[in-house]
Every structure is written in C-alpha cells, then in structure tokens.
Image (cartoon, grey):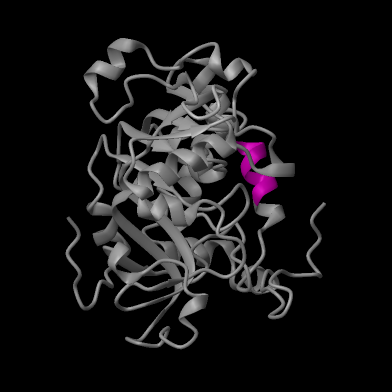
C-alpha cells in the first residue's frame, strides 16, 4: 500500500537503491523518446541483477541494462531505436546466446496487459494476436512459471465470448514491483505533467506497486493545480521524485530537447561487439561518477544544440540523417 509523504524528492542514488535485485519493473518512454536514462545509468553503476523487465517498445534503455548483465527475463513487443537500430544489438546478442529468457506479445497486447493491471482486473479480453504465430508458442518454460509466482501461469488463454460466441484472447494483467518514468515536470508531492505523447506511461505507472519518476524540473507544492486537466498522473501514485535535467539524453524529451542522432549512431556502432560495448560502458557509465559528470562528458554546447523549439516541441534544425 502506498504511503503519501508531503515531499517525495530524493537523490537518484537513493531512488535507485529502492529497487532490489530480481525486481519486476517496467520503464517508460518509447524507442527514441523520454526514457529515464539517468536512472538506467545509476542502476548499472549500482550493479542491479536478475531484473525482470516489461515493456512495449523500449530502446537503448533496455539495451544498456541487458548488455551490462542486469537482466534475467523480459516480456515485450520489440526492442529497437527506430532508424538507428531495427533491433538492439545487445538484446539480439543476449537472445542468440541464451543469456536472457523472453516472451513476446504485440505492442497493443502489452498495453492491454498494463491496463488490466492498472484497473486491478486479472486479465484483459482482446482480439489482438488471433491468427498470428504469437499464439503458437510460449517463451517461458512451465518450470519458470512455477518458480516465480509473479509470472503469469500461461502466456494467454483463448475462450468463446459468452455474449457473441466469437473467439477472444485473454491476456494476463501485469503488476510490477516498480515502474520508472521520465517526465517534463513534477511537483514536490508527485503530480506528474507529461507534454507530448504519453505512450504507455499512464498504464505502467498505475499497475506498479511503487512508481519512481525522474524529471526535467521539480515545481513547488501546488504549482500544477492550475489547469489540472493537463496533468497526466496523480500524486498518490508516486513514491519517489528525482530532478535530473537532460535526464533522457540521448533520447528526446518533448518541448525540452530532441534526441541526439550522432550519439545514438556512436552507441549502436560500438555496441555491435562485446569489446565495443565494454568500451562504451567504461567511458560513459562506469567511468563517470554521476549523471552530471556524464553530461559534462557529452558537452554543454552539444546539449544546447538539441534544445527543442518551444512551440514545436522538437528541434527543426536538427540533422537527423
């Protein structure tokens, strides 16, 4: 049961230390958009292990955690960085080597599973995945399902609708131990305002036992009470708040900054090989002591060039190719 404190702001080291090894977690954002990268870096520095991840369309956030050896199992639709990588290099490597156990759904199916968890119902009836190969095999062995009671007993079930006699797929609800998202602004009690698309962040936030939010800026108490219809997630869902400007780099944060195509190309080039990925980890994550040091390494001038147009929400001057 959540306990609401007046002020939930803490350091990123404190927030990451709340997440134990073997936790079941989901991470907000979508491919090249609004991933909580400062939190991901600190998880790797703290050596988290045997995590079970849930997601719709994660990107380099998952790729880093998987490559760094933090992840044991995943349930997802796909993992990629759009034009920069049609599939994450460390994710591909881990699957091919049998280092990570995985179960796959469609994007819509994962959103429905999060929504079921958010509503507190055990499953969601749907027509998605009917007629596809996704209903031919299960990713997890039955023994694994018995070992971990947090994993659904089966990937899905098919039944006849009692009202129409049509076939429907029943998808198990997701209830995570932690969800971590990155937002533009949060007030000190935890009211979250996300500009631009929410993707699956609302559903992921509400299906979690604990929600940690990193943000570009923390507002004072009551600052987000004006225009409450613009708020995305209520304060009572939030357990911890961390202010980290440029906290999604190299990914975009609508209205704040665009994604960093040069950095993403560099990452995917280095992450193709074990040695290259280790070099990236040592230089940009393990070799720096904090997110501030990481941003200093990236460079202030470079970050300023990513600043978004205040009306468009992205940088129209950015060279994306």
Tally of marks: 0
Query: Residue 22: image x %, image y %?
Result: 26, 34
Residue 116 showing in the rendered view: yes
Quadrant of the image occupied by residue 170: top left
Prevailing secondary structure class for the magenta stretch in the rendered image? helix
Identified at 41% across, 85% down, the residue is 225
Q: Is residue 55 visible?
A: no
Q: Is residue 192 left or right of residue 148?
A: right
Task: Reply above or below: 274 against 68.
Answer: above
Quadrant containing the N terminus is bottom left
Residue located at (51% from left, 65% from top):
295
Expressed as whole percent of the image width and height from the top left, the position of residue 239 reads 26, 63
The residue shown at (40%, 42%) is: 116
Residue 267 on the magenta segment = yes
Q: Classify residue 19 as left or right of residue 82.
A: left
Residue 196 in which image quadrant? bottom right
Of the pair 248 and 130, the residue shown nearer to us: 130
Of 307 and 45, nearer the camera is 307
295 is higher (above) or lower (below) than 174: below
Across and down, in percent, residue 36 comes to 46, 56
Q: Is residue 160 magenta?
A: no
Q: In the rendered structure, which segment of residues is drawn in magenta?
A: 264-270
Picture coordinates of residue 279 (x, y %)?
Answer: 52, 39
Q: Is residue 96 or residue 52 the one in the foreground?
A: 52
> Is 246 left, or right, of 286 in this rendering?
right
Task: Find the residue positioned furthest to the front.
Answer: 163
């Amino acid at each position: 049961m959540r306990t609401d404190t007046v002020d939930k702001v803490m350091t990123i080291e404190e927030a990451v230390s709340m997440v134990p090894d073997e936790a079941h977690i989901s991470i907000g954002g979508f491919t090249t958009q609004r991933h909580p990268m400062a939190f991901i870096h600190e998880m790797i520095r703290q050596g988290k292990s045997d995590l079970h991840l849930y997601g719709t369309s994660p990107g380099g956030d998952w790729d880093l955690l998987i490559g760094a050896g933090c992840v044991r199992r995943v349930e997802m639709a796909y993992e990629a960085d759009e034009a920069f990588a049609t599939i994450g290099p460390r994710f591909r490597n881990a699957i091919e080597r049998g280092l990570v156990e995985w179960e796959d759904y469609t994007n819509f199916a994962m959103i429905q599973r999060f929504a079921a968890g958010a509503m507190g119902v055990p499953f969601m009836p749907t027509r998605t995945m009917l007629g596809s190969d996704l209903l031919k095999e299960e990713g997890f062995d039955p023994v694994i399902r018995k070992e971990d009671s947090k994993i659904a007993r089966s990937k899905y079930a098919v039944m006849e609708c009692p009202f129409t006699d049509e076939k429907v797929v029943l998808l198990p609800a997701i209830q995570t131990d932690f969800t971590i998202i990155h937002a533009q602004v949060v007030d000190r009690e935890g009211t979250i305002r996300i500009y631009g698309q929410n993707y699956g962040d609302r559903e992921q936030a509400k299906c979690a036992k604990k929600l940690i939010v990193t943000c570009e800026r923390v507002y004072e108490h009551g600052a987000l009470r004006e225009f409450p219809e613009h708020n995305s997630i209520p304060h009572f869902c939030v357990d911890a708040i961390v202010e980290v400007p440029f906290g999604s780099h190299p990914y975009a944060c609508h209205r704040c900054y665009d994604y960093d195509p040069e950095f993403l190309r560099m990452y995917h080039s280095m992450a193709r090989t074990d040695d290259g990925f280790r070099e990236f980890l040592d230089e940009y994550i393990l070799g720096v002591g904090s997110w501030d040091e990481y941003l200093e390494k990236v460079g202030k001038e470079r970050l300023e060039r990513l600043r978004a147009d205040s009306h468009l929400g992205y940088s129209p001057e950015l060279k994306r190719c």
